[in-house]
Image: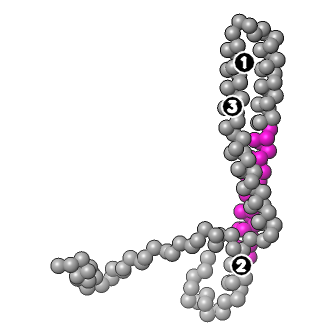
Amino acid sequence: MSVTNVKQDYLQTAPDTKEVEPPARQIAFTKYFTYLTPTDKVLLGVGTTAAILAGAILPSISLVMGNVAVAFSGGSSTSSANILSQMSVIASIVMLIALALFVFSYMFFAFWQHLAENITTDLRKRYIKALMHQEIGYFEVNKVE
């Protein structure tokens, strides 16, 4: 007995069971950005660039911490004044890296959050507009929430 015959026999003996619907069709990734305004595209570009820069800056802290190890392992020839001057330079570099990381991370989050709010508002407006253009009979047949 084949699988299709078993399925048909099962469906005939259990008439109130429903067949499983196929999964919903997926849309292309580029379709998400179909209705962006030019302002939204700028927000998307600047936010993405800021995210890339923040991600590129983050590993540089490891390189600077390597300089800390080199400053302390200079041997007996390095004086405490020399170590102190090297550490003050390294601390300045770490502060600049932290500031740049904060600025680019904030830009990334702020711009993408604003973009998400713009897209959500636009979708809600389109939904309400589509509902208002329906005939009254549509609401008698379909439940709209």
Q: Answer yes or no: do the residues labelled 3 and 1 have beta carbons within 8 Å?
A: no
Q: Amino acid at mark 1?
A: Ala
Q: Which residue is located at x 74 percent, y 61 percent?
A: 44
Q: Which residue is located at x 70 percent, y 89 percent?
A: 133
What residue is shown with label 1?
71
Q: Position of residue 84 (x, y in %)?
A: 80, 15
Quadrant of the image occupied by residue 95:
top right
**Relative to residue 102, is residue 34 depicted above or below?**
below
- Labels 3 and 2: the sequence-earlier one: 3
What residue is shown with label 3?
63
**Relative to residue 64, is residue 16 depicted above or below?**
below
In this view, the residue in front, 109 or 44, is 44
* Magenta stretch: includes residue 108: yes
Residue 101 in the figure: left or right of residue 27: right
Q: Residue furthest left?
A: 1
Q: CA distance from mark 2 to mark 1?
A: 61 Å
SS under mark 2: helix
